[in-house]
Image: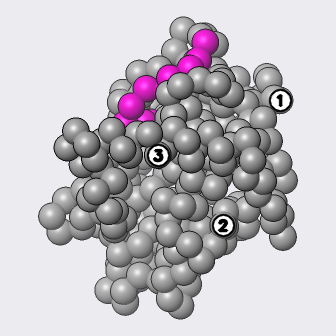
């Protein structure tokens, strides 16, 4: 049995209860247990709430709900508010842990217990982080370079699976509510940089989790296609805009931290 009594598993959920089942079942199959499991639901449809109730009988977790969809920021805040353990493993419901994750979670937890300066350990990404230095055999420490030309230096924080201290809000503030999910994530990226967050990153960033979106339960995040087009002129203009905006926001956009 792989036991992590000091870790709360926090899962955000919205209208993908079968995906939630797959995630919980994957941890169970890996014989992985946590101090507690919190599912934070963002006003899902009744059939999903009913299925979650059935899952509670099997997996013994606490579900905090909302009467309507209030967005990613609210869902993260209300879930984190009920966490009672020292560390929070945050995973969205459409991810599945791979067998190697259990070993690396133990390593990440050891690093955070030993080094109180580490705020966050990231386990997954779509792309590598541009600036870092080795921390151990498997993890790197992310470096923020003020004048680094690669604008994805912004993403020291990510909503992808990560381990963090449960007092995360004390240093970085709460998630911004009432705005789009990608803007919520963007603001937390700024806060982590501006408040000098210490972040570790698993170098083999596709080895620990896989993201699964099915036709029955597709991604609920709606994005503007122009933002991800590879057409040369659009990509060039987008990259130039991001380079200017991201660096301006990092250095001059000061966020008011709400800890309440």
- Residue 146 versus residue 236 in the image, above or below: above
In this rendering, the count of numbered labels is 3
- Does residue 144 belong to the magenta stretch? no
| 226 up-or-down from 241: above or below | below
Quadrant of residue 237 in the image? Answer: top left
Q: Earlier in the sequence, mark 3 or mark 1?
A: 1
Q: CA distance from mark 3 to mark 2?
A: 23 Å
Foreground: disc 3 or disc 1: 3
Labels 1 & 2 near each other (Cβ < 8 A): no
Q: From the image, give the main secondary structure of the stretch colored magenta.
A: loop
Measured in 3D between alpha carbons, the distance from the residue under mark 3 to the one under mark 1, in whole angstroms, is 37 Å
Please give the residue where the numbered disc 1 appears in the rendered image. Answer: 116
The residue stretch that appears in magenta: 124-133
Q: Which residue is mark 3?
A: 241
User: Could you say which disc has been placed on residue 15 in the image?
Assistant: none
Q: Secondary structure at mark 1?
A: loop
Q: Position of residue 189 (x, y in %)?
A: 62, 46
- Disc 1 or 2, which lies upstream in sequence? 1
Disc 3 crowd, CA 10 A, few/some/many (<14, 14-19, 20+)? few
The percent coordinates of residue 29 (x first, y second) are: 36, 44
Q: CA distance from mark 1 to mark 2?
A: 26 Å
Screen quadrant of the C terminus: bottom right
Q: Return the x and y of residue 74 as percentages of the image width and height.
A: 61, 73
Residue drawn at point x = 50 percent, y = 88 percent: 68
Q: Which residue is mark 2?
A: 176
Image check: 149 left or right of 229? right
Q: Residue at x 75, y 47 (%)?
A: 252
- Earlier-in-chain disc, 3 versus 2: 2
- Measured from the top left, where is residue 28 in percent x and y? 41, 48
> Can residue 101 be seen?
yes
């Amino acid at each position: 049995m792989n036991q992590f009594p000091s870790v709360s598993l926090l899962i955000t959920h919205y209208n993908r209860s079968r995906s939630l089942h797959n995630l919980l079942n994957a941890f169970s199959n890996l014989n992985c247990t946590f101090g507690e499991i919190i599912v934070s639901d963002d006003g899902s449809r009744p059939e999903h709430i009913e299925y979650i109730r059935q899952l509670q009988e099997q997996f013994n977790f606490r579900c905090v709900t909302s009467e309507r969809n209030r967005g990613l920021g609210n869902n993260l805040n209300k879930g984190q508010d009920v966490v009672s353990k020292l560390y929070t493993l945050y995973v969205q419901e459409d991810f599945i842990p791979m067998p190697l994750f259990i070993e690396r979670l133990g390593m990440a937890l050891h690093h955070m217990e030993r080094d109180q300066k580490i705020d966050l350990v990231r386990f997954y990404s779509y792309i590598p982080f541009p600036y870092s230095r080795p921390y151990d055999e498997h993890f790197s420490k992310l470096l923020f370079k003020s004048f680094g030309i690669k604008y994805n230096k912004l993403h020291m924080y990510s909503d992808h699976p990560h381990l963090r201290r449960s007092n995360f809000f004390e240093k970085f503030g709460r998630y911004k509510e009432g705005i789009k999910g990608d803007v919520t994530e963007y603001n937390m990226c700024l806060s982590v940089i501006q408040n000098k967050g210490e972040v570790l990153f698993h170098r083999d960033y596709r080895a620990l989790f896989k993201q699964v979106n099915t036709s029955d339960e597709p991604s609920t995040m709606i994005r503007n296609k122009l933002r991800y087009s590879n057409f040369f002129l659009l990509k060039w203009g987008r990259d130039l805009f991001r380079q200017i905006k991201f660096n301006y926001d990092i250095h001059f956009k000061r966020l008011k931290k709400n800890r309440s």
